């Protein structure tokens, strides 16, 4: 029998069948090394909630800005506000997919953690992607670049009526 579990203890779960690849079109990313069944907990990561000024005066001007998550807080007056949080561990390594996210995440605002879970069966070799929402601060590597004016003319010239 192990030591008694303290009610303040936060159980951690990390799926072992993962690797970080560093040479992808999205930079570093998390990939499955084995098939991962739907609903598997991928990781539980601790969050550091940033103060408003700390974020706007400092963090937003650093590369950490690209790693922060929205985090809901209740201010001293009891109003709901949106803050930012840094997520430690794998949570900061998941890239975004607009159309094919295979990982969902859930915040626990009292324990200051995020738990990531497989949304569907994930095959060995697949990248694990979450959704960052609709306002991206970078060019989505999944979207092909728009055609050049010449390519567009060429495409249009092929759409002819008989
Ligand atoms: C939270 S980090 C993810 C880990 C990051 N790829 C790295 O190498 O550290 C977010 C950054 O990853 C990159 N990224 C994530 N999803 C992307 C996508 N769909 N297309 C292009 N770049 C992406 C962007 O540079 C973004 O600012």
Image (cartoon, grey):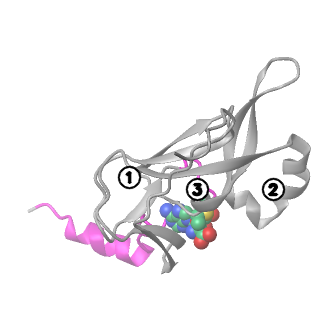
In this view, 121 is above or below 26: above
Q: Where is residue 131 in the image (x, y as percent from the top left)?
A: 49, 49
Residue position for label 2 = 60
Residue 153, x across and y down, in percent: 34, 72
Most common secondary structure along the magenta stretch: loop
Residue 10 is tagged as none
Q: Is residue 159 part of the magenta span, yes or no?
A: yes
Q: In this view, does 16 lie to the left or right of 133?
A: left
Q: Mark 3 = which residue?
A: 91
**Which residue shows up at 28% across the image and 67% down it?**
156
Sequence-wise first label, 1 or 2: 2
Give yes or no for contact between labels 3 and 2 (Cβ–Cβ under 8 Å): no
Q: Which of marks 3 and 2 is nearer the N terminus?
A: 2
Q: Name the image quarter holding residue 161.
A: bottom left
Give how far across and how far down residue 139 sits, in percent.
55, 65
Single out the mark in the foreground, 1 or 2: 1
Of 35 and 131, nearer the camera is 35
Dot 2 falls on a residue whose secondary structure is helix
3D distance between C-alphas at marks 3 and 1:
14 Å
The label shown at residue 102 is 1
Q: Distance between the residues labelled 1 and 2?
A: 28 Å
Q: Which residue lies furthest to the bottom in this view?
A: 23
- State the image coordinates of residue 28 (x, y, percent, origin top left): 55, 73
Please provide the residue range marked out in magenta. 132-161
- Taking the magenta stretch, the answer to whether it contains residue 43 is no
């Amino acid at each position: 029998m192990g030591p008694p579990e303290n009610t303040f203890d936060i159980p951690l779960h990390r799926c072992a069948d993962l690797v970080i690849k560093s040479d992808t079109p999205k930079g570093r990313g998390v990939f499955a090394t084995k098939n991962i069944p739907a609903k598997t907990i991928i990781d539980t990561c601790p969050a550091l909630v940033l103060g408003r000024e700390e974020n706007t005066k400092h963090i937003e001007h650093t590369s950490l800005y690209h790693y922060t998550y929205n985090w809901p807080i209740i201010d001293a007056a009891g109003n709901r506000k949106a803050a930012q949080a840094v997520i430690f561990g794998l949570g900061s390594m998941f890239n975004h997919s607009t159309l094919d996210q295979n990982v969902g995440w859930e915040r626990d605002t009292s324990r200051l953690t995020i738990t990531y879970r497989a949304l569907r069966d994930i095959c060995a070799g697949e990248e694990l992607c979450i959704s960052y929402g609709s306002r991206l601060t970078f060019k989505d590597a999944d979207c092909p670049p728009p055609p050049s004016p010449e390519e567009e003319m060429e495409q249009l010239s092929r759409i002819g009526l008989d």
